[in-house]
Image: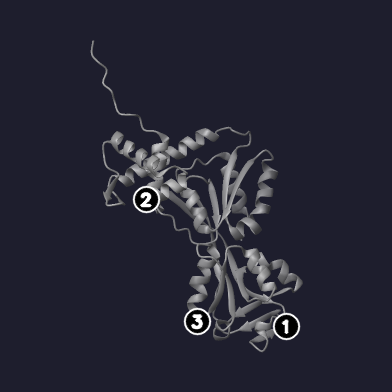
């Protein structure tokens, strides 16, 4: 009787998940933080996967990991497998289905709620999970297959463009604004009574203190690309993670702010805040839909897509 050959261990989802995280983050230490595993467990899982595949996925140069040419095709397949496994886990978990939606801060706080109301109206038993953060963080969650679909304000910049689908959704405009009768605008610029706004030129604005969103947010991306490049000597006194905090600080006359029109429309309507128009500055921007190509597009996913496509402006 022939003795059975002892084969290598089978590939596990954990090994694939570890590999994908290392591929995306570039190191075992960062992957261990993302996956909440010890660094030794991450390194062990990668070694086991390479042994099972009988090929290297990374080249070790000191403490650094450089991607081997084998890594990319395995990465694409691993992403698809992980996406399918997640779909199985959630398949028919709820009668109406489950959807994980991501949104950058402005969209999540000011634009998404009425869209969710429409989704619940169409599917009362829908199970919706929300993740709201800045654009960079939301896109990273899409890449990790933790989010079904995301709505973001800044240009998506995924690690691997080949696995991410991104489509233009709608447009938005950022506004520079100040407290009504702000001390910073006394004897600066011109107040246009007809349009209820101050009118400044670039040189005048560059002398005023600005409160802006943090790096990584979609709002900050537009401010950097379409405003601050014209203001090399601008006084940016604070970078803040929350739009509401900026709005309240401007209301306290700490400085001028720059946020989406959606964030300040109520205060503009009551006259508490006032728009500051700057000649030669265009702060319009595009909002994006983002999803992973390997993600299963369930009926609830399609229902949500239909709702947000109807909402285009």
Spot the residue most to the left: 2
Q: Which mark is residue 233?
A: 3
Q: Is residue 98 left or right of residue 136?
A: right
Any part of residue 312 in sight:
no
Please report whichever mark, 3 or 2, sits nearer to the chain's N-terminal start: 2
Residue named by callout 1: 193
Q: Nearer the viewer, mark 3 or mark 2?
A: 2
Please report whichever mark, 1 or 2, sits nearer to the chain's N-terminal start: 2
What is the quadrant of the C terminus in the image?
A: bottom right
* Distance between the alpha carbons at the discs numbered 3 and 2: 38 Å
Any part of residue 96 in sight:
yes
Q: Are marks 3 and 1 in contact (CB under 8 Å)?
A: no
Relative to residue 235, is residue 174 depicted above or below? above
Residue named by callout 2: 27
Residue that appears at 46% across and 44% down: 35
* Distance between the alpha carbons at the discs numbered 3 and 1: 29 Å
Q: Quadrant of residue 71?
A: top left
Please report whichever mark, 3 or 1, sits nearer to the chain's N-terminal start: 1
For label 3, the crowd category at 10 Å Cα-Cα, with few meaning under 14, some 14 to 19 and many 20 or more, is few
Q: Position of residue 199 (x, y in %)?
A: 63, 83
Spot the residue most to the bottom: 187
Q: Is residue 208 left or right of residue 273?
A: left
What is the quadrant of the N terminus in the image?
A: top left
Q: Which mark is residue 115?
A: none
Q: Nearer the viewer, mark 3 or mark 1?
A: 3
Q: Nearer the viewer, mark 1 or mark 2?
A: 2
Q: Position of residue 143 (x, y in %)?
A: 46, 49
């Amino acid at each position: 009787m022939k003795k059975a050959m002892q084969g290598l261990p089978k590939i596990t989802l954990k090994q694939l998940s570890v590999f994908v995280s290392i591929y995306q983050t570039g190191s075992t230490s960062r992957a261990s933080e993302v996956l909440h595993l010890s660094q030794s467990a991450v390194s062990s899982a990668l070694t086991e996967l390479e042994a099972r595949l009988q090929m290297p996925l990374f080249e070790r140069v000191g403490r650094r990991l450089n991607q081997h040419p084998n890594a990319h095709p395995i990465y694409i397949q691993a992403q698809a497998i992980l996406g399918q496994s997640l779909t199985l886990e959630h398949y028919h978990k709820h009668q109406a289905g489950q959807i994980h939606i991501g949104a950058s801060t402005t969209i999540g706080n000011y634009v998404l709620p009425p869209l969710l109301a429409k989704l619940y109206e169409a599917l009362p038993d829908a199970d919706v999970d929300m993740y709201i953060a800045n654009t960079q963080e939301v896109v990273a969650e899409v890449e990790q297959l933790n989010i079904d679909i995301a709505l973001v304000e800044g240009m998506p910049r995924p690690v691997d463009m080949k696995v991410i689908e991104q489509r233009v959704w709608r447009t938005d405009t950022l506004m520079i604004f100040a407290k009504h009768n702000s001390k910073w605008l006394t004897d600066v610029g011109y107040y246009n009574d007809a349009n209820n706004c101050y009118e400044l030129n670039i040189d005048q604005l560059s002398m005023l203190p600005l409160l802006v969103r943090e790096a990584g947010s979609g709002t900050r991306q537009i401010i950097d690309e379409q405003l601050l490049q014209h203001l090399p000597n601008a006084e940016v006194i604070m970078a803040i993670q929350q739009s509401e905090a900026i709005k309240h600080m401007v209301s306290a006359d700490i400085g001028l702010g720059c946020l989406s029109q959606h964030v300040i429309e109520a205060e503009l309507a009551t006259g508490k805040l006032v728009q500051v128009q700057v000649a030669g500055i265009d702060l319009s921007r595009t909002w994006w839909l983002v999803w992973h190509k390997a993600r299963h597009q369930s009926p609830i996913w399609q229902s949500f897509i239909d709702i947000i496509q109807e909402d285009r402006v």
